[in-house]
Image (tube, rainbow, N blue to C red):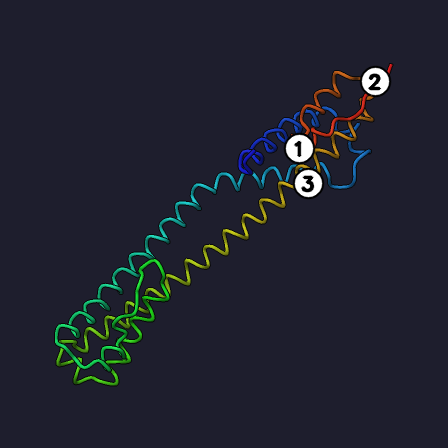
Amino acid sequence: MALGREISADHSKGLQLQELIRRDRARLEARLGAGVLDGLDADLALLWEDSAKTASSRQLQKAATWTQHDAAERLLAVVMAVRTALKLRKVEAVVLTRAGVGRKLDARIVRTVLEGARLVVEAYAEHPDVLRGAGVLPGDIAELEALSARLAAVDTAQEGTKVTSKQKTAARDAAHRRVKDAIAAIVGAAELAFVYDPERLALYRALLPKRIRARKASTPKE
């Protein structure tokens, strides 16, 4: 079972268990550790909140990725325009090399585009007359610097989004584990509380998470 489906299934079982607990709380609470029932309520609420935000979070990540790609494409276009101008003007090889001509750039790999822009800016600082002679203006260099700063900022923000997403996933998974542990503990308490009420006990047993229920409790031999 996929993790998302498993969490959804266990969340549903937890909600059903809450309904049983409302009637049986007094009989169960004394057999459970402090905070088990209240902890279940809190973690179920957390899982519900997380599932409600998941779709929105994915859309934000997608938007951030497109923003990053757009910034990289714009910067790449300017870098390649400068390179093409230098090659068409047949500037000397040492300047072409200094400007990064020949180095592979990929808009999907931010560091390559930023490096390409940096080399052009440095080449202009070292050989301003040559680049000016090829048609590169100070305004072009200023645009390269501005686009580089924008791309670097967007890239940093995108990485921050990934970290935040990992943290949220870790918190969700921890809550899910606690929900499963709480359900198992509550059903265990029900085994004793309803030992003479098999029909009521069956309702609790049916709510054990699938991976826990696989280890079926032994039944007395007649």
21 lies above or below 97: above
Q: Which sits in the foreground, 200 or 212?
A: 212
Q: Which residue is mark 3?
A: 39
How dense is the environment of label 1, judged by Cα within 10 Å: few (below 14), some, or many (20 and up)?
A: few
Give the residue displayed 19% in from the left and 75% down from the top: 139
Q: Nearer the viewer, mark 1 or mark 2?
A: 1
Give SS at disc 2.
loop
- Amino acid type, mark 2: Tyr
Q: Quadrant of residue 190?
A: top right
Q: Which sits in the foreground, 178 or 131?
A: 131
- Left or right of 50 in this view: 191: right
Disc with the residue nearer the chain's start (1 vs 2): 2
Q: Nearer the viewer, mark 3 or mark 1?
A: 1
Give the residue displayed 68% in from the left and 40% down from the top: 39
Disc with the residue nearer the chain's start (3 vs 2): 3
Q: Nearer the viewer, mark 3 or mark 2?
A: 2
Q: Which residue is mark 1?
A: 211
How dense is the environment of label 2, judged by Cα within 10 Å: few (below 14), some, or many (20 and up)?
A: few
140 lies above or below 169: below
- Left or right of 186 in this view: 173: left
Q: Which mark is residue 179?
A: none
- Rendered location of residue 118, percent (x, y): 31, 74
- Rendered location of residue 13, percent (x, y): 62, 29
Q: Which residue is mark 2?
A: 196
- Amino acid type, mark 1: Arg
Measure the C-alpha gap from mark 3 to mark 1. 21 Å
